[in-house]
């Protein structure tokens, strides 16, 4: 299925360049926005699969736009959840971490290669995580604070089975569903079931929040080396 994309950035050159790159890969850019308010309106009107959303924009910044967009639980024309990909110039921007907590499906640096941009859009459309382990560790190390209320249900890892904790650990290391299946000698369908149960038990929105939860609870620590990642 061809992804339908909205690009929100206050720079015309960025929007034009990304549109050309995606169009050349048969990805349909259905709308553009120059600020966060326009982005929210475009998502409501066009119901895209993916929103590429810049952090620093006038009128309404990308962080607040992300919060408002995802608070409405937007769906695509096919009925699937719309995914938000954050665009930033800085790979250690505290607003990026806040956006991930708000439910964004990942983030991209603006100097990303065309191939990685295309791969990123297709990846999050399939509801996979988009967090390189090295960047994730640096974000968590700099901005995350360990959870202080371990009794909170969404942070209570005791609710997970040993297998689910193992799956969560590997998710936090950056493994995709296919890589998880290979590492654990399971089918991808079984892996997806484990992931769904983890999200339900911890009351998390998606895989990205699962990664954040794994770091915040100490299941994974910033200094620990992870596995491979869908995007480098």
Image (spheres, rainbow, N blue to C red):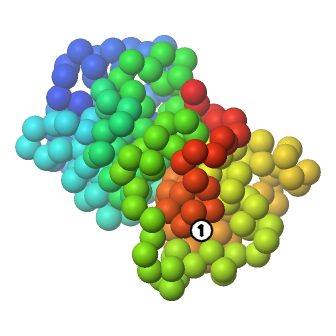
- Which residue bears the numbered disc 1? 199
Taking depth in this image into account, of 169 and 192 the one nearest to the observer is 169
Q: Is residue 119 left or right of residue 165?
A: left
The answer to which image quadrant residue 133 occupies is top right
The answer to which image quadrant residue 220 occupies is bottom right
Taking depth in this image into account, of 224 and 24 the one nearest to the observer is 224
Q: Is residue 139 visible?
A: yes
Q: Is residue 130 visible?
A: no
Q: Is residue 187 above or below residue 113?
A: below
Q: Is residue 204 left or right of residue 72?
A: right
The single residue placed furthest to the bottom in the displayed view is 151
Residue pictured at 57% horizontal, 78% vertical:
156
Q: Is residue 171 above or below residue 194?
A: above
Residue pictured at 86% horizontal, 44% vertical:
182
The single residue placed furthest to the front in the displayed view is 223
Crowd tier of the residue under label 1, counting other residues whose Cα lies within 10 Å: few below 14, some 14–19, many 20 or above? some
- Residue 152 locus on image (x, y percent): 48, 82
- How many numbered circles does the render carry? 1
The N terminus sits in image quarter: top right
Q: Is residue 119 above or below residue 194?
A: above
- Residue 114 locus on image (x, y percent): 48, 16
The C terminus sits in image quarter: top right
Residue pictured at 68% horizontal, 71% vertical:
197
Q: Is residue 204 left or right of residue 39?
A: right
The single residue placed furthest to the left in the displayed view is 59
Q: Is residue 37 above or below residue 113?
A: below
- Residue 171 locus on image (x, y percent): 66, 52
Secondary structure beneath dot 1 equals helix
- Residue 208 locus on image (x, y percent): 52, 53
Residue pictured at 27% horizontal, 35% vertical:
54
């Amino acid at each position: 299925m061809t992804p339908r994309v909205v690009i929100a950035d206050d720079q015309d050159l960025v929007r034009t360049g990304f549109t050309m790159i995606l169009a050349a890969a048969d990805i349909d850019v259905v709308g553009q926005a120059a600020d966060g308010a326009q982005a929210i309106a475009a998502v409501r009107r066009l119901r895209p699969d993916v929103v590429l959303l810049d952090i620093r924009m006038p009128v309404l910044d990308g962080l607040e736009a992300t919060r408002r967009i995802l608070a409405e639980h937007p769906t695509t024309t096919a009925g699937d959840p719309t995914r938000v990909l954050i665009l930033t110039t800085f790979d250690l921007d505290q607003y990026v971490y806040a956006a991930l907590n708000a439910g964004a499906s990942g983030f991209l640096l603006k100097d990303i290669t065309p191939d990685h941009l295309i791969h990123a859009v297709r990846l999050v459309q399939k509801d996979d995580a988009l967090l390189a382990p090295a960047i994730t560790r640096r974000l968590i190390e700099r901005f995350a604070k360990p959870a202080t209320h371990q009794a909170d249900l969404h942070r209570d890892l005791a609710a997970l089975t040993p297998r689910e904790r193992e799956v969560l650990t590997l998710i936090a290391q950056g493994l995709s569903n296919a890589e998880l299946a290979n590492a654990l000698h399971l089918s991808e369908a079984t892996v997806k079931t484990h992931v769904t149960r983890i999200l339900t038990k911890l009351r998390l929105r998606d895989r990205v929040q699962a990664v954040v939860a794994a770091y915040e609870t100490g299941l994974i620590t910033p200094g620990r080396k992870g596995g491979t990642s869908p995007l480098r």
